[in-house]
Image (cartoon, rainbow, N blue to C red):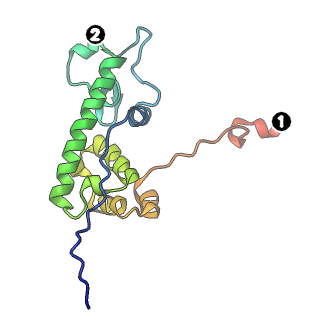
Amino acid sequence: MVLISCATITPVTNEFNISDEYVEYIKTTVNPYEWGLRDNGRFYPYSRPGGRMIGYGQSAFDKKYYSQGMSKEEAENNLRNGLEKTLTDLRQYLITHYPEHPFDQLSSKSQEILLDHAYSTGPENLSDEFYSAVIKQDWDKLFNEFLYICLLYTSPSPRDGLLSRM
């Protein structure tokens, strides 16, 4: 007697929601020192290599920001809206270019990394090699070829001259 199973394998879904914790993380990566935040509690445009920015990495496209600024609440709402739009675009991009790897079937870590980088550059501007490394969770390749890691050193350091006093 031969038994044949006709059960279908349902892929695991990991629907990504933009949590408050994720928003806080993105705020600290795109504007860690709250550049442009003045004593009145409002953000004003600041310069970055990509152009004039305001708040949490949004383009300062509206001239009113130069005179009126933007509240922290407005900046966070703009960030959330930008992340939501990027998430929609990223899901669509993966369906089109990587149909065997839908966004909601990736690991949570892969989802976070892709959204973080797609928010900064746009899903269409990430390289195929980057997508491949994130999808495969090839952390060695990601860290060695794509991610910039800054190690902060604390004193005492030879540069600050404190070692000579120890």
Where residue 60 appears, as percent x and y from the top left, is 25, 24
Amino acid bearing label 2: Gln
Q: Is residue 159 above or below residue 60?
A: below
Residue 44 seen in render: no
Q: Is residue 50 above or below residue 41?
A: below
Distance, label 2 to label 1, CA atoms, is 50 Å
94, 130: nearer the viewer: 94
Task: Name the residue beneath numbered marker 1.
Answer: 165
- Image quadrant where residue 155 sits: top right
Q: Residue furthest right?
A: 166
Task: Name the residue beneath numbered marker 2.
Answer: 68
Where residue 110 appears, as percent x and y from the top left, is 37, 54
Q: How many marks?
A: 2
Amino acid bearing label 1: Arg
Where residue 24 appears, as percent x and y from the top left, is 42, 32
Residue at the image point whose x is 42% and y is 24% from the top: 35
Q: Residue furthest front?
A: 1
- Image quadrant where residue 145 sits: bottom left
91, 41: nearer the viewer: 91
Q: Is residue 99 above or below residue 71?
A: below
Residue 23 seen in render: yes
Ranked by sequence position, the earlier of labels 2 and 1 is 2
The C terminus lies in quadrant: top right
- Image quadrant where residue 130 sits: bottom left
Left or right of 111 on screen, residue 99: left
Residue at the image point whose x is 29% and y is 41% from the top: 119
